[in-house]
Amino acid sequence: MMSKSFATVNPCSMCMPMGSVLVFRGNEGCMPLFHGSQGCSTYMRLYLAHHFREPVDIACTALSEKGAVYGGAANLMQGLKNVIKGYNPKVIGIATTCLAETIGDDVPQIVREFQAQEPLAKDVTIVSVSTPSYAASHEVGYRVALKGLVQTMARKSEPKGQINGRINILVGSIISPADVRFLRRFLDDWGLEYILMPDISETFDAPLSQDLPLIPRGGTPLDDIRDTANSKATLTIGGWVQEPGAGDYLEKEFEVPHIALPLPMSLEFTDRLAANLEDLTGLCMPESYERERGRLLDTMVDAHKLLSDVKTAVYGDTEMVLGITSIMAELGMRAQIVATGAANPAFAENAAELAPGSKVMMGADFSQIAAEASRRDIELMVGPFTGRVVARKEKVPLLRVGLPNHDRYGASHQLFLGYEGSMHLVDCMANVLLEGKEKKVQHE
Ligand code: SF4
């Protein structure tokens, strides 16, 4: 059900350009640049730095009143020059904020002019995406940035039709650096040749070192991004209910077959990833993961007596919410509210199937989630920390999952993907629920 409210009080989503930063920062030598007002980049830098506990640089063209009236071309050109001189990036990812979108700057045209007249631009790839926050959420910003990178950089190798034998693994929605590291391990143990993008495993979770590079090390190598056009297939992990993105573009433009999958959270969704990899490669899942699968089943049997029939509210990013709802259904939990801030009808359809009888909300605001939570006697909430006000009011425990998470440590290390990650999720839900019960007893 789409929100019918005429005013947003406390949205269950974030700004569209913020999603683009999570993609741009997952690629080798890439520097994000916002075209728009300075406050937007300050807010998003802080927001991401609090979540990942890492410094996050986002350059900005700092449009002022003059730029807002006469157009921001001069600011954008100067901004590009400054970023090249100051950061020496290999790629600049430009995302627009509401102001630049409202005044209607033609960013691709300004970039073309810059590339034609500025010698500094010759060794830098510039990707620009349109991210008006008043039109869509951070999830859409993430999707358009991933597509924009592939559109700008993927190239068919010569002679035409030559295939590199690799599989593109596109991370289609926001997951933690630990989840990305898990995906790499899973694919390596399988013995696969693959291209994974974006890769935030190091760029948002770097080891402590004495030197602090201006642009973090790691990320998907740029040659790999170019080579995505020559792969034998694409799997978008966490692209199940998303509108056409990078994988669809590669299929349409370069005939690379594309399969969109849910995030591998829960038994069923992880099995689905494994089955697709088996089909694509003709190889069986490694024995160690069969044993992990067995451990997940054992964990579910153990926790079932505590978790079954528990009434829950799940909210946050579409793919993450569907993954969590799936494991709740497997455990016999009763998801009563399944909500996202994104406007995504495919999400609503699948959420209703996974949790029959629940209140499914898209374009959700926390004020609506709060009203519904009191009506439905919720016992556990699962989602980003932004739901804590509702949890406090309803006196129910909250398991913090996904972005943003500002009031707890370890967001980068939360592993919820695969059989192992699903096992953690079950343990965490059980423990948070038990702690909540203990607190209640202490206060009685
Ligand atoms: S809503 Fe628009 S103006 Fe406000 S912070 Fe987000 S991008 Fe900037």
Image (cartoon, rainbow, N blue to C red):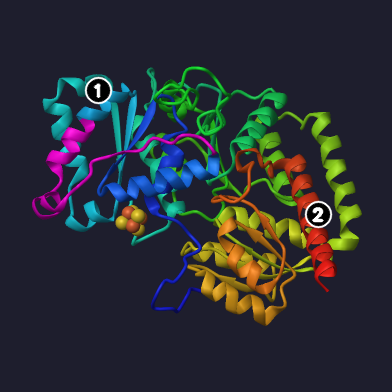
Disc 2 target residue:
431
Q: Is residue 318 above or below residue 19?
A: below
In which quadrant of the rendered view does residue 235 lie? top right
Asked if residue 116 lies in the magenta stretch, the reply is no
Residue 308 position, x and y percent, is 84, 65
Residue 181: give its label.
none
Which amino acid type is marked by label 1? Lys
In this view, the residue in front, 345 or 140, is 140
Indicate which quadrant contains ligand 1: bottom left
Disc 1 target residue:
85
Residue occupying image coordinates x 59% and y 36%: 177
Which segment is the magenta one?
53-80
User: In which quadrant of the rendered image does the C terminus lie?
Assistant: bottom right
Q: Secondary structure at mark 2?
A: helix
Q: Is residue 416 above or below residue 372?
A: above
Residue 162 position, x and y percent, is 46, 21
Residue 325 position, x and y percent, is 69, 60
Q: Secondary structure at mark 1?
A: helix
User: For the residue carrying disc 2, how many other residues have a C-alpha within 10 Å: few (<14), some (14-19), or many (20+)?
Assistant: some
Q: Residue most toward the front?
A: 443
- Earlier residue among tags 1 and 2: 1
Asked if residue 67 lies in the magenta stretch, the reply is yes
Residue 186 position, x and y percent, is 69, 31
